[in-house]
Amino acid sequence: MTGSRYTGVGAVAIIVALAVLAGDRGAMVMDGVIGRLAIGLFAAVAVFALFAWADRRDPALLLVGIGSAVVVVHEAIQTSIFLISTPDSAAWLALYGFSTLAGLLVLLGNLLNVVPWRDRRGRPPLQPGLVLAANMAGLVVLDVLAVTVRTSGTWQPSGGLGKTAMIVLLAGGVTVMVRSLRWGGRFGWVAAAGLALAIAGLSALVANTADSGTWTWVARAFAGTPGLAAASLVAFVVVGLQMESTRSRRASDRATQVMEGRAEIASIVAHDVRGPAGTIRSVAGSLRTSYQRLGDPERLEFVGMIEQESLRLLRVADQMSLGLKTDAGTLAFQFVVRDLEGPVLQGLHDAEVGDREVRVHAGADVHASIDARWVAEAARQGIENALKFSPAETSIDLSVRRDGADAVIEVADRGPGIPPEMHGQVFEKFCRWRPYGYEDRSGSGLGLFITRSIAREHKGTAVVVDRPDGGTILQIRVPLERET
């Protein structure tokens, strides 16, 4: 149900509430304005919950809606009995002081069934006729019991039957609250409704056990408890629906984001895998059809091409796997205070440098608390990124130095550079931006994303700055070991 439809249903509920409030007969059910308010609010709950159930098919809304409607109908029937019977008749006395409790007990029974019916996976849906029949049968049983007790001469409005109903209302409300909270946040509004019924039962007990000096004040306080229960139900049904709609929207947005991410991953994998896979297939096919005509040198050349493209294919898979683990935050880090030169050189060794020149400038005694494996990986990603987006005839400068309280790993190239507006975006996941002249370079767009994520795990940063004489400098900063 959309927000506008909820607004419309809420308006109808308010009109129903005002209509009931305006009736003098409604005022006869409970004394004063509070009595009218309680009836009107229960009617509003019934209208709102049942309209919402018709849209959402949520058993909780059906149970609350029919329970609230039954309370209103029962009060109307009681009013009719009051009008056509004398104040001393058995029916009048039997319902006096017990009618509201009977309605609240039936509503309590519905709330006790919210959680079990909400979790009926694979079972038939809850039928409105069944709920209505069960509610009406419960009211009939309670009314017959009240008349029977009155006829036996033991009835008092605050006697044993009334107090038993109050205790059941208190205990049942607490049970609803505890059970709903144990089943998680999606039942929070049901728990609050149970709390309201528990307060109504407790207030009734206090009113019926108070001494004569406090009777008037407590009785007036008790007169408001049905209204409190009804008002709470209105608030909790509306707030609960809003919270659930928010959760559903967030879950939907997250699912959409995940699906879009998967689609993007699939597109990138397909793009990056297609090249080496196509080359392997082509070379293997040529080798198979021309094998007898080729000499050993040509065969070795074909096998070498297959090996090279296979390694490229494996790197694509490894890069994608590492990027997804980084995004999920599942990389394990073990920090040890050590010199940064070793891990950085390891990253250089693991990188696909080929014939390119990499000049190393390592400062002495640059120590930090690091995970050597992942620092090496961050350096490797930065080096390969610089090699990919700089001219083949130029060299790469790799350095480790101190800068204030930070240890800085720098990878400097002599490529076309990165525009200032792209300095932050190149670190985003799956960034597909390419500098001018390098648009055809393959890549997953995860290299700098992985580098920045590893730096952040070390409580550091990763940024790109312009090289004064042209090109780009990648700076990976981590806190230095504090000297004691």
Image (spheres, helix red, strand yellow):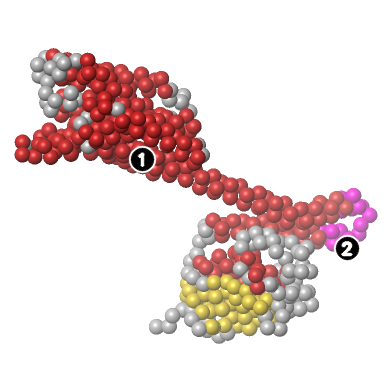
Residue at coordinates 77% horizontally, 64% vertically from top-left? 439
- Sequence-wise, the earlier of marks 2 and 1 is 1
Q: Nearer the viewer, residue 329 or 428?
A: 428
Q: Nearer the viewer, residue 40 or 402?
A: 40
Magenta segment includes 301: yes
Q: Amino acid at mark 2?
A: Pro
Local secondary structure at mark 2: helix
Q: Nearer the viewer, residue 171 or 475?
A: 171
Magenta stretch, main secondary structure, is: helix
Q: Which residue is mark 2?
A: 297
Can you give x and y, in whole percent of width and height, for residue 428 in the image?
61, 63
In the rendered structure, which segment of residues is drawn in magenta? 287-303
Q: Which mark is residue 433?
A: none
Q: Is residue 457 left or right of residue 399?
A: left
> Which residue in the rendered view is the most extreme toward the right?
293
Secondary structure under tag 1 reads helix
Q: Amino acid at mark 1?
A: Phe
x%, y% of residue 354? 75, 71
Which residue is more in the foreground, 256 or 159?
Answer: 159
**Residue tagged 1:** 236
Within 10 angstroms of label 2, few (less than 14), some, or many (20 or more) residues?
few
Q: Residue at x 50, y 40 (%)?
A: 4
Q: Position of residue 129 (x, y in %)?
A: 41, 20
